[in-house]
Image (spheres, helix red, strand yellow):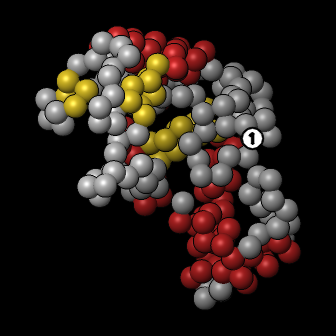
């Protein structure tokens, strides 16, 4: 909303449990709020800040406990404990699980396609990437393997001088599964699969 002065007015801010505060000039707070010393306007309500911290601690424990329940150890559990993994969901650009990103199986199952896995990202392990908190994302084993396989296939065809359209045709001819929810590869999908 714009005022006559040309300044943009801050919007209504929504806080937990449907509580709102109107940051527009002349409005009065509906809950006790603290003033933000830098911005000179009301900040996050005190009850909400405490609630957010408590919710985050509970979420951290929950994600770490769920990962342990699936048989995961190491960096993923450590990251969840430190609040660096907020949700138990596949973070790959393309998730292939038929029931969604948040569905996982135990590492103890015989066929572990959908168990949690650590994916080296943004620097792949094949490019010297290390297994550290700044280079790991959570994935399904199957999504991680498909992503790696696609990169190798596409990379080899790019080095051979093939166009993205030509690579899409090759992948379709070889019946390489396309992104979840699509039937055929396109040049844009090939590029996305390679650079993501």
Q: Nearer the viewer, residue 47 or 12?
A: 12
* 41 sits left or right of 177 in the view: left
Q: Which residue is drawn at 33% across and 51% down?
A: 3
Residue at the disc numbered 1 = 97
**From where the camera sits, is residue 140 visible?**
yes
**From where the camera sits, is residue 48 visible?**
no
* 26 sits left or right of 51 in the view: left
Q: Where is residue 162 in the image (x, y as percent from the top left)?
A: 65, 86
Q: 53 above or below 114?
A: above
Q: Where is residue 114 in the image (x, y as percent from the top left)?
A: 71, 35
Question: Where, quadrant-wise, is the C terminus in this rendering?
Answer: bottom right
* 101 sits left or right of 175 in the view: left
Q: Nearer the viewer, residue 6 or 89?
A: 6
Q: Residue at x 33, y 28 (%)?
A: 27
Q: Residue at x 78, y 77 (%)?
A: 170
- What element does badge 1 sit on? loop
Q: Where is residue 182 in the image (x, y as percent from the top left)?
A: 81, 59
Q: Residue at x 60, y 33 (%)?
A: 89
Q: Residue furthest front?
A: 4
Q: Position of residue 118 (x, y in %)?
A: 52, 38
Q: 164 above or below 1?
A: below
């Amino acid at each position: 909303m714009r005022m006559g002065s040309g300044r943009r007015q801050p919007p209504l801010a929504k806080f937990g449990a449907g509580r709102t505060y109107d940051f527009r000039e002349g409005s009065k707070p509906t809950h006790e709020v603290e003033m933000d010393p830098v911005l000179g306007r009301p900040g996050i309500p005190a009850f909400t800040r405490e609630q957010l911290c408590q919710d985050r601690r509970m979420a951290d424990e929950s994600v770490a406990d769920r990962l342990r329940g699936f048989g995961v150890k190491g960096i993923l559990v450590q990251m969840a404990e430190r609040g660096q993994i907020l949700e138990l969901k596949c973070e790959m650009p393309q998730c292939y699980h038929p029931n969604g990103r948040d569905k996982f199986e135990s590492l103890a199952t015989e066929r572990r396609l959908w168990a949690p896995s650590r994916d080296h990202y943004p620097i792949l392990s094949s490019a010297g990437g290390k297994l550290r908190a700044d280079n790991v994302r959570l994935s399904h084993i199957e999504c991680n393997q498909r992503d790696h396989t696609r990169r190798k296939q596409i990379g080899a065809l790019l080095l051979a001088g093939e166009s993205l359209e030509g690579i899409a045709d090759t992948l379709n001819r070889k019946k390489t599964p396309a992104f979840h929810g699509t039937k055929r590869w396109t040049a844009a999908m090939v590029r996305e699969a390679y650079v993501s």
